[in-house]
Image (spheres, rainbow, N blue to C red):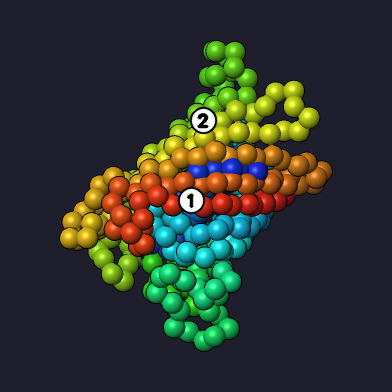
Amino acid sequence: MHQFPAAAALTLAATAVAAGQTTHEASVEAEATLLGLPPIGAPAPEDPPRPYRTIRDVSVSVGADYVTKYISRGIVFSNEPSVQPWLELRFALTEPDDDDPHLTWRIGTWNSMQGADAGEGRPRGTRERRLRHWYEFDLYTGLQVDFFDHFQTSFMFYYYSSPSGAFDDIHELEWRLNYDDQWVWEQELGLEGFALYPAMRITAETRHPERGGAWYFQPSITPSYTLQDAPVDLTVSVPVILGFGANEMYLDEDGENIYLGMIQSGLRLSTPIDLGDGDLSIRGGLDVTYVTDSNINGFGNDVEFVGRLGVTYNF
């Protein structure tokens, strides 16, 4: 369904942001890695996770992604192209300060819609025909804390639902930790515009109709380089994401737990556009996901490729 936001962009990525249930991960990850998306996964791939600093009491982030398949946490939720719009509001609870933590309350929604019947290749919806293309509708809220200037953590609650009736409601708690290491490479090594952006994501299901509370663990790095002296701001990234699960997150054909479920990597391109009162980001990419057991992704495939194109507007 979402993992959620970082610095904007045109993302050419080989990632399938992981979801063992409906999640938000993809797009909203774009600023805190995600990217977040947020959702059954989220989506998906995400921009480099850079700590977010708000300068207003309230800020808004809105965007959408087009993906050739909907894959999250290595699981294929739709084998058809999908459009995934999202909206997030952020309320600054404290003023930005280098010495004290900066608190931001976030609330948002993430959706996945497709031209074919919702859940094509998966169980189809059971509700009225006018909602058959609306596979997923997610809500999320929680607290984000920026601290020590280069760290960011968040504690979120996700509610995943399907207007088409393709799956029953799922609830999930999520914790993320992101580190912006760009200053290390620039100040200590003299390499301007480069960073690894290490991150950790942990989720725990609190409600699932078919299992008793799966856990998901996602360590990642996103090596990124912003081209210097280029006519346009362009960031090239190569994400590396591991997806671990416990308590029925990933199962083999015999119903036994698989702990390392998937590996993601890819190539991403991103570029920001300054619009004065707001910032527009364009991203595009190719995601590649390898699952350690063909039973995991729902189609019996070991490798999946996903093309994506997205836009984000922050104001």
Mark 1 vs 2: CB contact within 8 A: no
Q: Residue at x 78, y 30 (%)?
A: 231
Residue 86 pos. (x, y %): 60, 60
Which amino acid type is marked by label 2? Pro
Q: Is residue 198 visible?
A: yes
Q: Residue at x 41, y 70 (%)?
A: 122
Front residue of this view, candidates 277 and 253 = 253
Q: Is residue 39 visible?
A: no
Residue at the disc numbered 1: 305
| Dot 2: element | loop
Front residue of this view, candidates 211 and 310 = 310
Q: Residue at x 74, y 23 (%)?
A: 229
Q: Report whether 313 appears left or right of 251.
A: right
Q: Report whether 302 appears left or right of 278.
A: left
Circle on res. 280: none
Residues under labels 1 and 2: Cα distance?
Answer: 20 Å
Figure quadrant of residue 219: top left
Which amino acid type is marked by label 1? Phe
